[in-house]
Amino acid sequence: MSIRVRFWGIVPAAGAGRRMGTEIPKQYLEVAGKPILQHALEHLLRVPRLSAVMVALAPGDDRWSDLACARDPRVLTTRGGKERAESVCNALHALAGLADPDDWVLVHDAARPCITPQDVERLMDALQSDPIGGILALPVTDTLKDVENDAIQNTLDRRRVWRALTPQMFRYRTLRTALERATAEHREVTDEACAVELLGLKPKIVEGRPDNIKVTQPEDLPLAAFYLERQCYE
Ligand code: CTP
Ligand code: MG
């Protein structure tokens, strides 16, 4: 008899938000009445299948304890690292006593407050029988150019290019091996899928919603507020 596989969340929230340029790290900026990180966690916690969410925080973070989610029994915390991948690795280590090797881990950026529980559920439903896992992604609508020294070298085949979003969902064992190997080999990985690809595996994509934006620069704040307010009426 097989043991039921569980789902765990990881939210890397230890970044400084340099491109945002604010004194407060962007995950703590208020949008539509709440800090960005609070929105992201609330939306994840609306997914009943997530057993718990491990949040990686910057050392010395004194804003976390003011969030309502900090008191939720399904929310756990650990220390983040210097790079996003290190923060996710720390969170995997912190889950070691709880998660089984075949359990699923969903990594979601703290800076994506507009994730909908329905998108998370669709990712889970689409990939739970998959051996490897995959990510939410968006097809691109613009024509894409390959550029060198301000000159176009080529036009890319748009049908083959997708934008990687989060959550990214992998088996605990696969993700831990992938990130530990990428770190040991000093490979720069900007998302979990990239580390898994370096193992020679081919993560799947599941089409996500275009409003699942990553708040990166100041102009993203009013856009996130607009999407969050509009989602209230769905
Ligand atoms: N992150 C993290 N630990 C780091 C760096 C980033 O947990 N050492 C998290 C961020 O908090 C964010 C997510 O990874 O939720 C995506 O990273 P990004 O959008 O690049 O955020 P920052 O690194 O904070 O922003 P910037 O790159 O502009 O400094
Ligand atoms: Mg960054």
Image: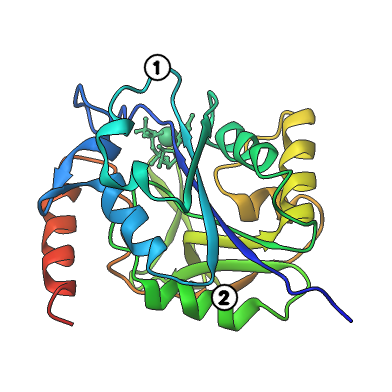
Helix, strand or loop at label 1? It is loop
Residue type marked 1:
Gly
The amino acid type found where label 2 is placed reads Met
Residue displayed at 31% across by 32% down? 65
Residue 74 on image: x %, y %: 47, 53
Q: Quadrant of ligand 1?
A: top left
Decide which of 105, 84 is in the foreground and name it: 105
Q: Residues within 10 Å of mark 2 (few under 14, many from 20)?
A: many
Residue 129 visible (yes or no): yes
Where does label 1 land, which residue?
Answer: 60
Q: Residue furthest top?
A: 60
- Residue at horizontal 43 percent and vertical 25 percent from the top: 58
Direction right: furthest residue: 1
Q: Position of residue 234 (x, y in %)?
A: 18, 82
Q: Is residue 74 above or below residue 169?
A: above
| Dot label at residue 124 | 2
Q: Residue at x 48, y 77 (%)?
A: 121
Quadrant assignment for the N terminus: bottom right
Q: Position of residue 132 (x, y in %)?
A: 75, 67
Is residue 208 visible to us here? no
Q: Residue at x 73, y 66 (%)?
A: 202
Foreground residue, 179 or 47?
47
Judge depth for marks 1 and 2 and give the one in front.
1
| Secondary element at image label 2 | helix
Do labels 1 and 2 touch, CB within 8 Å?
no
Q: Nearer the viewer, residue 211 or 104?
A: 104
Looking at the image, tell me whether mark 1 or mark 2 is earlier in sequence order: 1
Quadrant in which residue 23 is drawn = top left
In the image, residue 45 sits, relative to residue 54, either above or below, namely: below
The CA distance from mark 1 to mark 2 is 34 Å
